Image: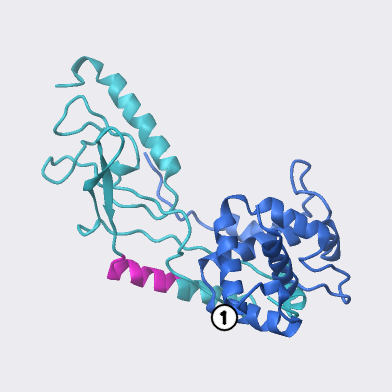
């Protein structure tokens, strides 16, 4: 759906939004697999993605991805500062795709699987904490 | 966004919680559902026109709820507390406008859901509430549906009198 230049710009922006981290051992949001997920996932929000890319290109006076790295960061910072609905949609897509990547989930200590259908074993807390609540006189009126 | 993202995310991950307060609007006359004079569906039936303004009373209830919730969260050790009221995106319970009552001048349906004006019309949904209710209304609507169905059954011989 995106043209080649738009694709490059979106990838550059994703890399700025969530850079790779050697400290945590995670890729950037512009990583091949994550970016492919982003391209597959924006679907009905395509207009918002395109709107953000148009704004970036206007700021750049050309193709955002062709700017020098420092200029790209500055343009992205201005975009963030101006905010707006379209950027909110794009941020949601990028975050959604980033934090469901297996490598990112592992780095956060998460099991690489959806919570359902298997479900998680919930550690039982101290149910006796509820004893004072159970012992309390009722707060409600009986309905007849 | 940016180089600080990874650290900031990990600082918040599994260390956030939220609270929601639901407030009960009073039955305020400035909140209405009327027929839209212009907008119609493909069959020419007017669309509902919904007018809603947050009243001073509701605003104060929201402020009170946020203040108490903030106290609770801070007492629990929260250091960054953020709030918004009303929430811009979320479920809103649209209720009332055909309220229940015994007086036809002040209500739309009687105490068992039959319209005062049209004897063979029964209204069985959230519109027969007299106020919005303080919490989610589905179970009360289900209970009303059972109650009104029972009332209809018991009055079959004289239902439209």
Instruction: Look at 46% across and 76% down and name the residue there.
Output: B67
Q: Quadrant of residue A69?
A: bottom right
- Expressed as whole percent of the image width and height from the top left, the position of residue A136 reads 54, 58
Residue drawn at (58%, 78%) of the image: A59
Rendering quarter of residue B159: top left
Residue B74 can be seen, yes or no: no
Q: Quadrant of the C terminus of chain B?
A: top left
Question: Can you tell which quarter of the image residue B147 is in?
Answer: top left
Please tell me whether residue A104 is drawn above or below residue A59 in the rendered image: above
Magenta stretch in the rendered image: B54-65
In the displayed structure, B157 sits above or below A117; it is above
On the question of residue A112 being in view, the answer is yes
Work out which quarter of the rendered image holds the N terminus of chain B and state it: bottom right
Chain for numbered disc 1: A
- Locate residue A102 relative to residue B78 in the image: left or right: right
Q: Which residue is mark 1?
A: A81
In percent of the image, x 40 and y 55: which residue is there? B134
Give the total number of marks visible in the rendering: 1
Q: Chain in blue?
A: A
The residue tagged with tag 1: helix, strand or loop?
helix
Which residue is outermost to the left? Answer: B105
Give how far across and how far down residue A120 sits, in percent.
Answer: 78, 49
Q: Is residue A79 magenta?
A: no
């Amino acid at each position: 759906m995106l043209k080649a230049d738009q694709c490059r710009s979106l990838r550059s922006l994703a890399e700025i939004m969530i850079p790779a981290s050697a400290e945590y051992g995670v890729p950037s949001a512009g990583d091949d697999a994550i970016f492919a997920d982003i391209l597959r996932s924006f679907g009905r929000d395509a207009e918002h993605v395109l709107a953000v890319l148009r704004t970036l290109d206007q700021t750049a006076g050309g193709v955002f991805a062709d700017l020098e790295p420092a200029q790209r960061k500055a343009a992205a910072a201005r975009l963030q500062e101006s905010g707006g609905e379209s950027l909110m949609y794009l941020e949601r897509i990028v975050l959604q795709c980033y934090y469901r990547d297996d490598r990112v989930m592992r780095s956060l200590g998460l099991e690489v699987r959806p919570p359902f259908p298997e479900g998680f074993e919930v550690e039982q807390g101290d149910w006796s904490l509820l004893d004072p609540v159970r012992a309390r006189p009722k707060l409600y009126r009986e309905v007849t | 966004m940016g180089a600080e993202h990874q650290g900031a995310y990990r600082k918040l991950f599994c260390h956030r919680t939220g609270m929601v307060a639901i407030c009960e609007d009073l039955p305020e006359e400035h909140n209405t559902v009327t027929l839209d004079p212009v907008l119609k569906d493909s069959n020419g039936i007017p669309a509902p026109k919904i007018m809603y303004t947050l009243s001073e009373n509701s605003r104060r209830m929201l402020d009170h709820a946020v203040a108490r919730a903030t106290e609770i969260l801070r007492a629990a050790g929260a250091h960054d507390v953020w709030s918004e009221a009303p929430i811009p995106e979320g479920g809103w319970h649209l209720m009332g406008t055909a309220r229940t009552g015994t007086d036809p001048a002040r209500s739309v349906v009687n105490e068992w859901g039959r319209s005062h004006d049209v004897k063979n019309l029964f209204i069985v949904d959230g519109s027969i509430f007299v106020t919005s209710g303080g919490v989610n209304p589905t179970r009360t609507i289900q209970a009303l549906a059972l109650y009104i169905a029972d009332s209809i059954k018991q009055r079959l011989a004289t239902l439209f009198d």
